[in-house]
Amino acid sequence: MKKRNGVPMGHPKSLRNMLYRSLGAKNFGVFWHYWNPIFGYYLGKLVFKPLRRYMPARLSLVFTFVFCGFIHDLVVLSIRGRMSYFFMIWFLFMAVGVLISRWLKHDLSRLPWLFRATYNLSYIGLTFYTASYVDYAISVLW
């Protein structure tokens, strides 16, 4: 926690630091390094690293994101009583964004924090909208 947020777990500035560092990240891949460090740590340790032993890192990353979406969809299942695939779809699109960001070697670090935050939030919003559309299309077809 301290390594990613600069403060120990439970510190009053923990949430502020997480938001500041993740939103102001130089690219979408780095955004996820800072976002929700506790959950990210366990996803890395319990999902990504074991998958990495059997498949390439890029594919392991995609499966880790989709698994995280699956966990979120299980929460929806527990509340609504029916399965939703929205989060798995959304997180798949976000994983693709991470891979594209790495492939293009995005580095927005020289730009102002507000621009970087707008960039990262815009990608999240775009993928949210796209996942909503795909999820709706799937529900209509099935």
Image (cartoon, rainbow, N blue to C red):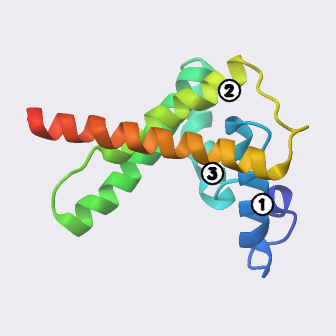
Decide: is 99 above or below 12.
Answer: above
Q: Tell me the kind of residue under disc 1.
A: Tyr
Residue 56 locus on image (x, y percent)? 59, 17
Q: Is residue 122 left or right of residue 84?
A: right
Give the CA distance from mark 1 to mark 2: 20 Å
Give the CA distance from mark 3 to mark 2: 19 Å
Q: Tell me the kind of residue under disc 3.
A: Gly
Residue 139 locus on image (x, y percent)? 15, 40
Q: Which of 85/107 is in front?
A: 107
- Residue 40: assigned label: 3
Residue at numbered disc 2:
101
Q: Earlier in the sequence, mark 1 or mark 2?
A: 1
Other residues around mark 3 within 10 Å, as few (<14) / some (14–19) / many (≥20): some
Q: Tell me the kind of residue under disc 2.
A: Ser
Q: Are marks 1 and 2 in contact (CB under 8 Å)?
A: no
Q: Residue at x 47, y 33 (%)?
A: 93
Secondary element at tag 1 = helix
Q: Earlier in the sequence, mark 3 or mark 2?
A: 3
Residue 132 locus on image (x, y percent)? 32, 43
Q: Is residue 102 left or right of residue 71?
A: right
